[in-house]
Image (tube, rainbow, N blue to C red):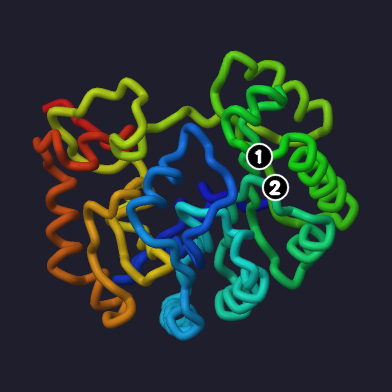
Amino acid sequence: MKTIDDVFAKEWKLFYPRAIQLETSSLCNSHCTYCPYDSVSKIFPKSRISEDLFINIINQVKHFQPQLFAPYMNNEPFADKHFLKRLKIIRDALPNTFIDIATNGSLLTEELSQELLSPEYAVDEIKINFPTIIKEEYEKLTSLNYDLTLDRVIKFINIAQKVDFKGRYRIVMVDSKHLEIDVEFWRSKGIPSNKYAKVSRGGIIDTGLIAKNLVNGCKYNRQNEWMHILSNGLVVLCCMDWHRQQVLGDLNNQSIDQVWNSNSYQAIRKRISNSEDKSFICNNCEWGITYEK
């Protein structure tokens, strides 16, 4: 069973992004306290990708076949009613690309789960964000209906086991005082799970992170390997750039190649390699790397 780590262990010599992250809509049905969605959705208008833009992007990536494609970003992918149709288009265009999906699980009806887990889509990894198994805490953290969501997640898992799903699925939890209980619950059902440490999203969420005096790179090398595309076509620095501080291009009037090799991208890569600016997003991000000189 392939993992994302396996993908990034491979060589990549093309002058194109190794990984594409594309949200097909900006919508989310949750209001998680550890996520900036609520505040950001009041700043920027809601958007859904146009069919023309979506097809244009897929036709471009088809030519260089990225190693990873994640059709979500700062959103809930299944809030897009056309998501499965678009997922099929992605898979047909990228038959060997690792497809990764993350969801809060609340919209995973049995019918949707059955279709999503079919070989037709050949999804490689599905992450379900279920912060805690403690009902009161879960609903406080997410605002979602605990009983409904848990029922849908359990049924999704049962279907995955029944159809012998070839991809990987796992539960992602928030690091909390209930972590041992959460881990044991999913372990008892034979479900892999891992904790997620709360992050500041580049300084937006208060986690106690102090801005770094010096940053020499990104832990996940986002500036050199990933392209992050919003549903309105704007290309931002990474999935942490919720406030769109670094808009590097616009695929409504530029190609992926033009944006990837633009002066803006070159400049941001150089900046990330040596930033002493404490107001810069990477200096306020847990992923910002500091090397001792």
Count how many numbered circles sit on residues in the image.
2
- Please tell me which residue lies in front, 90 or 76: 76
Q: Is residue 3 left or right of residue 187?
A: left
Q: Looking at the image, is mark 2 or mark 1 earlier in the sequence?
A: 2
Q: Residue at x 71, y 55 (%)?
A: 167
- Circle 2 Cα neighbour tier, 10 Å, few/some/many (<14 / 14–19 / ≥20): many
Looking at the rendered structure, the kind of residue marked 2 is: Ser
Disc 1: which residue: 144
Determine the secondary structure under disc 2: loop
Q: Residue at x 48, y 28 (%)?
A: 197
- Circle 1 Cα neighbour tier, 10 Å, few/some/many (<14 / 14–19 / ≥20): some
- Please tell me which residue lies in front, 188 or 135: 135
Q: Is residue 38 left or right of residue 128?
A: left
Viewer-side label of 2, 1 = 1
Q: Are marks 2 and 1 in contact (CB under 8 Å)?
A: yes
Q: Is residue 293 left or right of residue 138?
A: left
Residue 28: x and y, percent? 54, 52
Residue lying furthest right in this view? 162
Disc 2: which residue: 106
Determine the secondary structure under disc 1: loop
Q: Residue at x 50, y 64 (%)?
A: 25
